[in-house]
Amino acid sequence: FYRPTFRMHLTNQEIVTKLLSYSQELKEHYEIYQLLLFHFQEKQADQFFELIQETLDSVNPIFQTVFKTFLKDKDKIVNALALPYSNAKLEATNNIIKVIKRNAFGFRNFENFKTRIFIAINIKREKTSPVLSRC
């Protein structure tokens, strides 16, 4: 009894390669996307916007819309890449609070609501003890 060995699942890379083989336009757009992603992750704003300018007229209209938005907000994107500041943690905390509020359908006691938030975002209350000053 012979049982052929074969894989039932393709890797993500194999799936992408197969999909890109169906369309040259898709492959070209995917390569542009990968280059943009690389420049963005490497915080190379000049190369990022240079690539957008070079390909703006030759890409799909959906890409053109996105590229024009990037160009319109260029100063904001450059600042985001250049500066070490981010509001990601604040946005995540706000999202956690909104989810707790939505799931709770209104706490009767605000202290319980506040305690649940502190537990969810792993904040420990610091106990302050009076310090005697030395005179």
Image (cartoon, helix red, strand yellow):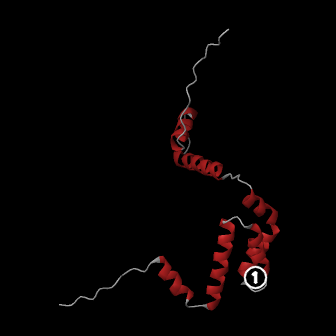
**Residue lying at 57% horizontally and 20% vertically, measured from the top left:** 129
Residue 56, horizontal then vertical, whole percent: 77, 81
Q: Secondary structure at mark 1?
A: helix
Q: Is residue 107 visible?
A: no
Would you say 62 lies left or right of 1 here? right
Q: Is residue 28 visible?
A: yes
Image quadrant occupied by the C terminus: top right
| Front-lying residue, 76 or 113 | 76
Quadrant of the rendered structure where residue 43 is? bottom right
Q: Amino acid at mark 1?
A: Thr
Q: Is residue 37 above or below residue 17?
A: above
**Residue lying at 79% horizontally and 84% vertically, measured from the top left:** 57
| Front-lying residue, 26 or 110 | 26
Identify the residue position indicated by label 1 in the image.
55
| Front-lying residue, 111 or 55 | 55
Image quadrant occupied by the N terminus: bottom left
Q: Is residue 88 above or below residue 73?
A: above
Residue 76, horizontal then vertical, whole percent: 78, 61
The residue most toward the left is 1
Residue 31, horizontal then vertical, whole percent: 64, 81
Q: Is residue 77 above or below residue 104?
A: below
Mark 1, other Cα within 10 Å: few <14 / some 14–19 / many ≥20: some
Q: Is residue 112 above or below residue 68?
A: above
**Residue lying at 78% horizontally and 81% vertically, measured from the top left:** 54
Residue 115, horizontal then vertical, whole percent: 53, 36
